[in-house]
Amino acid sequence: MNKTRSWFGLVTCCATPALIVGLSCALLFVSAAVAFAAADGGKAVAIATSETDNPGGRTFAGLITDDHCGARHEMDSGMNPAECTKMCVRNGSRYVLIKGSKTYALAGDESKLEGLAGQRATIVGALTGHTIKIVSTTSAR
C-alpha cells in the first residue's frame, strides 16, 4: 500500500525539531544571564542605588595616605603612618586614598584630610578620572 503524507504531517515533522532547538537556546541564554547576575552579587544594582541615594557623589572607603609612601611607610623612620603622611604632604606630596590595588588622588579641604592621615576613612565625593573631589569625610574608627 502506498501512503501519501499530508502537508500537515510534513510541516509538523520539520517544525518540531526547530521549536525544540529554539526553546533550548532560549533556556540556555536565560540561565546564563541568571548565573552571571548571581555571581555579580547585585553589585550593579547596589552601585546605582548608592549613587541615587547619595546626591553628593559616590562613597569610597580606604586608607588615606600620601602619594610618595603609599600604603607602606618606612618602618625605620620612627614615625607612625599618620606622622609620616603629614610630613610627606608638607614636603610636596599629595593626599591619596588607597582602596585595594587602586589609588585615587584627593582634592578638597586638606585640613579634613590632615586629621584622617594614615587612617582608614570613608569619603563621599565625585570621581573624575583618578581624582576624587571630596564632599565629606568620615573616620572608619
Image (cartoon, rainbow, N blue to C red):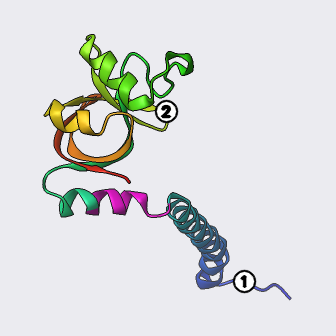
Which dot marks residue 4?
1
123 and 69: which is toward the camera: 69
Q: Secondary structure at mark 2?
A: loop
Residue in the image at 36% along x and 20% along y: 67
> Is residue 86 visible in the rendered structure shown here?
yes
Q: Is residue 127 visible?
A: no
Name the image quarter holding residue 96: top left
* Residue behind mark 2: 101
Position of 37 with respect to 64 (left or right) is: right
Give the numbered dot on residue 60.
none
The magenta-colored residue range is: 41-49
Is-magenta flag for residue 92?
Answer: no
Contact (Cβ within 8 Å) of mark 2 with mark 1: no
Q: Quadrant of the N terminus?
A: bottom right
Give whichever of 11, 99 is nearer the camera. Answer: 99
Nearest to N terminus: mark 2 or mark 1 = 1
